[in-house]
Image (tube, coloured by chain):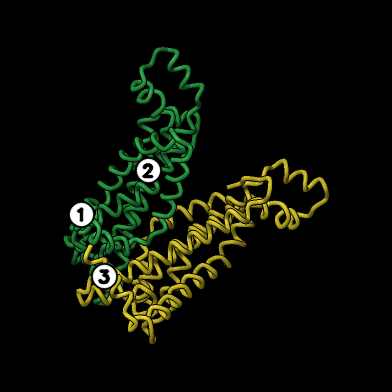
Chain colours: A yellow, B green
Amino acid sequence: MTSFLEALAWLGDPAHWSGPSGIPIRTAEHLGYTVLGVLVAALIAVPLGLYAGHTGRLASLSLALAGAARALPTLGLVTLFALLLGIGLGAPLLAFVILAIPSLLAGTIAAVQSADPATVDAARAQGMTETQILARVEIPLGMPLLIGGVRGATVQVVATAMLAAYVGNGGLGRYIFLGLGARDYPQMLAGSLLIIALALVLDLSLLLLQRLTAPRGVRAA
Amino acid sequence: MRWVLDNLDVIAGYTGAHLVQALPPVLIAFALSLPLAKLANARGWLRTSVTTTSGLLYAIPSLPLFVLLPGLIGTSVRSPLNIAVALTLYGLALMVPAASDAFRSVSRDVLGSATAQGFAPAARFLQVELPLAGPVLLAGVRVVAVSTISLVTVGGVLGVPSLGMLFVDGFRRGILAEIAAGVVLTAALALIIDALLVLLGRALMPWTRQQGVRSA
């Protein structure tokens, strides 16, 4: 327990709250990496998932690929791309995107397919075009599942963003690796607590969003 | 390629260490999840809180948890035991909700019929409820196994031996083949264990083959 007190003392030290390697900047970096990674992955996975979910084409292939991608070790991808692309944000970003796509793709496909086929047929019978069915029926009904995919992807990228520090970038992972190198356990612990707090805040916010986007009268999630 | 061929013994050693760290947490998480899920299903409020806690636990990134545990339970940051405890927690976070769903998927009428036919509670659980929950349980264990095998590698940055050391060492020394070998081997190990679980499921639950019941 003394190590926790030391970690809290580390966190309470005003020197650690200012400057380019201070907690606010590192947190902003970590958050920035996460948002950027999930956003780029969503630009690829969401349209693909909407297409696959709505038409049924490529759906099982997409899900199989998404499942297989979960077996990829995050640290392996980050170090591999860092050697291939050199130091910089490009390598970790590529890893974030690859690791975020499976959750987003699976979530989007599940979201579109969660709509009752009878409801979809009713929309079609009323004269809605396929795009309208997707935008006004399938997406709103499946929104909580889609946000669930974003949640899964965010959890994955927050964890991987920590490894960005391992290959020379910023983020809260810095404190863990600096502490590891200097055998400074309180610093490692303080960094860990910060990352855990950030991960939980993000996860709870998305959980709340998931609840809020559930259509009234439908308990899809 | 040359690096891989010159270091087959190193790779074999890390693969062994990897399996030793990955398999016990999967087995322990599975064994513990069964009573925990039964307990959770017995009370509605308990089930909700178990699902919420599991979700939050799973949201905690692995490396910070590896760092946090020594402060809580006194293990060493660099010990395989520390990694195993963390992986068991992640396994439980995935497996308890899965087992809870699995037991809920068993029809109450079927359980009622078994009781009427004279099954004692223990026999009813082992011979009726557990086999019927089997396919959903198997789906849960497959996810736990794949995720655990992949997570073990993160211990590499702390110096705990596993295939993750190939990433750490390969990155430090700039050997691309070493990292690539690690990625391929970790994914292959996960897929092999997954395939073995599917085969085990077919052997233990032959009826799932005939009806074409799929466990995703």
Label 2: how many Cα within 10 Å (few below 14, some 14–19, many 20+): many
Residue type, numbered disc 3? Val
Question: Is residue A24 positioned above or below B166 on the image?
Answer: below
User: Could you say which is closer to the camera, residue A214 or residue A104?
Assistant: A214
What subunit carries mark 3? B
Q: Chain of mark 2?
A: B
Q: Which residue is mark 3?
A: B168
| Quarter of the image that includes the N terminus of chain A | bottom left
- Provide the chain ID for the residue under circle 1: B
The residue carrying pointer 1 sits among few (fewer than 14), some (14 to 19) or many (20 or more) residues within 10 Å by Cα, namely: some
Task: Give the residue at mark 1.
Answer: B81
**Which mark is in front, 2 or 1?**
1
Residue B10 in the figure: left or right of residue A160:
left
Against B143, is A91 above or below? below
Q: Secondary structure at mark 2?
A: helix
Q: From the viewer's perspective, is B68 left or right of A134?
A: left
**Along the line of sight, which residue is nearer the eye, A51 or B133?**
B133
Q: Is residue B159 visible?
A: yes
Picture quadrant where residue A166 is located: bottom left
Q: Position of residue A132 (x, y in %)?
A: 75, 56
Residue bearing the label numbered 2 = B141
SS for callout 3: helix
The residue depicted at 71 percent of the width and 52 percent of the height is A137
